[in-house]
Image (spheres, rainbow, N blue to C red):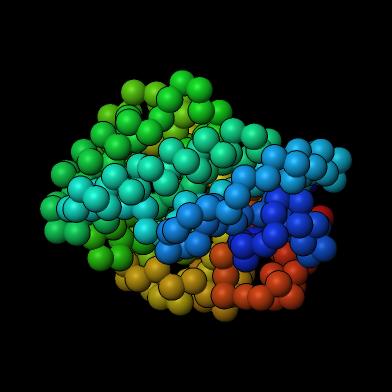
C-alpha cells in the first residue's frame, strides 16, 4: 500500500496550487492553515479552484488532506468572546470545507487558562456540541497535545472524556502528533505498541484519522512542544520510520510539521519513503 506522506504547506494561492506544490516534493497529502494561524478572516471561497482541486487530486493520487484550524481557536478560554470567536471560526471553516473532497479538519482542543481540566473539558464538549451538525461531512479531529501550559489533550484519557460528551460522535476523530505525545510522556521511542494499545483502549484506534510526524527537541515528559527535524531530535529516525511502517498506522495521512522550508521537506519525504521501502 502506498504511504500518504506530506507536510504542512505555507498558505498558498489556493487548493490547486497547494496540490501542485505537494506533488513537486513527492508528497501525496498536505496540511494547511484554514486562515492565518493567528486567526483573522479566511480567504474568499473560490469554488472553481476547489472543483479543479478535487479533480486534480483524484487524478494524481493525493489522499486525505488536513485543514488545520488557527491556533487562536480556544473553545475553553475563560473569556466568552474568545469562546464565541472560536465557535464561529470552526463553523465557518467547516461550512467552506463542505466543497472539498477527502479532507479532515484538525484543531487544538484548547487551554483552560487556570479554570481547571474538568471545566476545560466541559467547555470543549459543549462547544463541539454547538458546532457539529448532522450535515457536516468533514471529520473534526482533536489533536493530541504536549501539555504545554494549561493545554487540554495531553493524555488519551482527556481526549476520551471530550469525545464521551459529544452527541454526534461519528463526526469526531483524533490526529496524533508524534512530538506532542512524546513530550506529553508517552514512550513512542521504545514502546510504540504499548502507546497505541493505550490509545485503542481509551479512545479507539478507529478514531485515529491523521498523524503529524515530528521529531522533538525535548525529552519525553517535558511538556514542551518544540518540533525538530526528522532524525535530529530525541525521537530519532528509527522510531519515526517505525511509525510510518506500523501496520496500525500506515494507512493514515502523515504530515511533517518540522522546521523546514520546501526543499527541507522534500528531503525528509524522500528519506522517509526510501526507509519505508517505497
Ligand atoms: Fe497542531
Ligand atoms: Fe501537530
Ligand atoms: Zn506542536
Residue 20 appears anywhere in the view:
yes
Residue most extreme to the top: 134
Q: 48 or 235, which is in the foreground?
A: 48
Q: Is residue 232 left or right of residue 182?
A: right
Residue 163 appears anywhere in the view:
no
Q: Residue at x 58, y 39 (%)?
A: 97
Q: Residue at x 24, y 50 (%)?
A: 81
Image coords of residue 17 (percent x, y): 76, 57
Q: 20 or 179, which is in the foreground?
A: 20
Q: Residue at x 80, y 42 (%)?
A: 52
Location of residue 265 (image quadrant): bottom right
231 is higher (above) or lower (below) than 35: below
Q: In this view, does 161 lie to the left or right of 54?
A: left
Q: In this view, does 209 lie to the left or right of 127?
A: right
Q: In this view, does 176 lie to the left or right of 10?
A: left
Q: Quadrant of the C terminus?
A: bottom right
Q: How many labels does the image show?
A: 0
Q: Residue at x 68, y 45 (%)?
A: 46
Image coords of residue 166 (percent x, y): 33, 28
Image coords of residue 43 (percent x, y): 58, 53
Residue most extreme to the front: 44
Q: In which quarter of the image is the N terminus?
A: top right
Image coords of residue 267 (percent x, y): 74, 73
Amino acid at each position: 500500500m502506498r504511504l500518504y506522506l506530506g507536510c504542512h504547506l505555507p498558505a498558498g494561492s489556493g487548493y490547486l496550487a497547494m496540490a501542485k506544490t505537494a506533488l513537486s516534493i513527492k508528497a501525496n497529502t498536505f496540511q494547511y492553515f484554514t486562515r492565518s494561524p493567528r486567526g483573522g478572516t479566511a480567504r474568499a471561497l473560490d469554488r472553481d479552484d476547489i472543483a479543479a482541486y478535487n479533480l486534480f487530486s483524484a487524478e494524481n493520487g493525493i489522499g486525505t488532506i488536513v485543514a488545520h484550524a488557527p491556533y487562536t481557536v480556544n473553545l475553553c478560554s475563560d473569556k466568552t468572546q474568545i469562546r464565541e470567536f472560536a465557535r464561529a471560526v470552526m463553523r465557518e471553516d467547516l461550512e467552506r470545507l463542505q466543497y472539498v473532497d477527502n479532507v479532515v479538519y484538525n484543531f487544538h482542543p484548547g487551554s483552560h487558562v487556570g479554570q481547571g481540566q474538568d471545566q476545560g473539558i466541559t467547555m470543549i464538549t459543549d462547544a463541539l456540541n454547538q458546532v457539529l451538525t448532522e450535515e457536516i461531512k468533514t471529520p473534526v479531529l482533536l489533536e493530541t497535545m504536549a501539555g504545554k501550559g494549561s493545554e487540554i489533550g495531553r493524555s488519551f484519557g482527556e481526549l476520551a472524556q471530550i469525545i464521551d460528551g459529544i452527541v454526534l460522535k461519528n463526526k469526531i476523530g483524533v490526529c496524533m502528533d508524534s512530538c506532542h505525545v512524546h513530550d506529553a510522556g508517552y514512550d513512542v521511542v521504545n514502546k510504540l505498541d504499548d502507546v497505541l494499545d493505550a490509545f485503542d483502549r481509551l479512545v479507539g484506534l478507529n478514531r485515529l484519522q491523521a498523524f503529524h510526524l515530528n521529531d522533538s527537541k525535548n525529552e519525553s515528559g517535558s511538556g514542551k512542544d518544540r518540533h525538530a527535524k526528522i532524525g535530529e531530535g530525541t525521537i530519532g529516525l528509527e522510531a519515526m520510520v517505525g511509525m510510518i511502517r506500523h501496520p496500525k498506522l500506515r494507512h493514515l495521512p502523515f504530515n511533517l510539521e518540522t522546521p523546514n522550508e520546501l526543499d527541507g521537506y522534500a528531503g525528509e519525504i524522500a528519506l522517509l519513503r526510501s526507509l519505508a521501502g517505497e
